[in-house]
Image: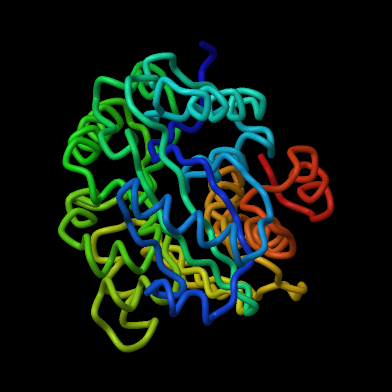
Amino acid sequence: MSKIALFALGNALIDQEFQVSDDFLATQNLQKGTMQLADGEAQTRLYTNLQASQTYKGQASGGSAANTTVAFSALGGRAFYGCRVGHDELGQTYLDGLNEAGIFTAQQSISEGVTGTCMVLITPDTERTMHTYLGITAELSVDQIDFQPLEQAQWLYIEGYLSTSDTARHAVAKAREIAKANDVKIALSLSDPAMVQYARAGLTELLADGVDLLFCNEQEALMFTETADLDAALAVLLENNQNVVITLGAKGALVASQNEKIHVEGRKVKAVDTNGAGDAFAGAFLYAIHQGSNLEQAAELAILISSEVVAQFGPRLAIEKYARLQQSIELDLA
């Protein structure tokens, strides 16, 4: 395998996306804007109800860190994705989709079990709510991960959704150990307000002694730090992390290091679906940093890419569109 720049760890899920009403969320007892874990039977019941009364928008290979990795790769970076899928049709479809996007995977990602699925529910206000059956990805462990590419990577990227799994947290700990031994920088995303609310201890374990780059949105930042405003939240996050990016939706992003704090304005688009926007932001930001951009330039590219994701249904753009968007703005790349 050729040397890669980004080594990412995350869940492997096949997304089924639906347009739904707010009333439907209420009748299904789903909390808007968060991710809820469920067993296979609950997932099947919800899927049946969705097919009977809501609007189906399509299927896509998902997973938060996978979406980030696709954006990084489509912009021109070489990337590897460590995950776990079942020995079934959906599992092979998932890995094939990553490979077609130019992302390296390992055959040891395949194991006995059922590939996870996620019902992505988009309400009229474009907010996304997720109902997830993790399947075998809930048992991601060191056995499914080929750590060799990590030794020569530039970045290790970790999704916060792994905080709910004991075996995945152990795998992340090993990845962090390898990264530190080989001077690989570490980035992590808090991923979801539900992870902050229900898996705080797991997130704290994933963060360990801090990371080089932390991604979160405004709600996650305030919840995780238990503060009332962004300045206070940022101060807390910078105590243990070298760089922090707080996405602000249409208002853009707040990016900060130990020495500077910058607000980068958002971009006006007609929002359709927020699913995957934060993931795309992280992938574009990491790519720009990898290419030598400063924090502000990286945020500009990330906002451009993520705003285009918001303007369509689905968590990823067509592969060729990432490069076209990159070419449409001026970046001081090394």
313 relative to 165 in the view: left or right: right
Residue with the most extreme bottom position? 228
Residue 213 appearing in the image:
no
Q: Residue at x 30, y 31 (%)?
A: 179
The image shows a total of numbered marks equal to: 0
| Colour pattern | rainbow
**33 shown above or below 328:** below
Q: Quadrant of residue 176?
A: top left
Q: Viewer-proximal residue, 136 or 296?
A: 136
52 relative to 151 in the view: left or right: right
Q: Residue 60: image x %, image y %?
A: 61, 43
Q: Quadrant of residue 171?
A: top left
Q: Residue at x 50, y 54 (%)?
A: 47
65 relative to 280 in the view: left or right: left
**320 shown above or below 244:** above
Q: Viewer-proximal residue, 190 or 272?
A: 272
Q: Residue at x 76, y 72 (%)?
A: 269
Q: Residue 218: image x %, image y %?
A: 43, 75
Q: Viewer-proximal residue, 328 or 138?
A: 138
Q: Viewer-proximal residue, 70 or 178?
A: 70
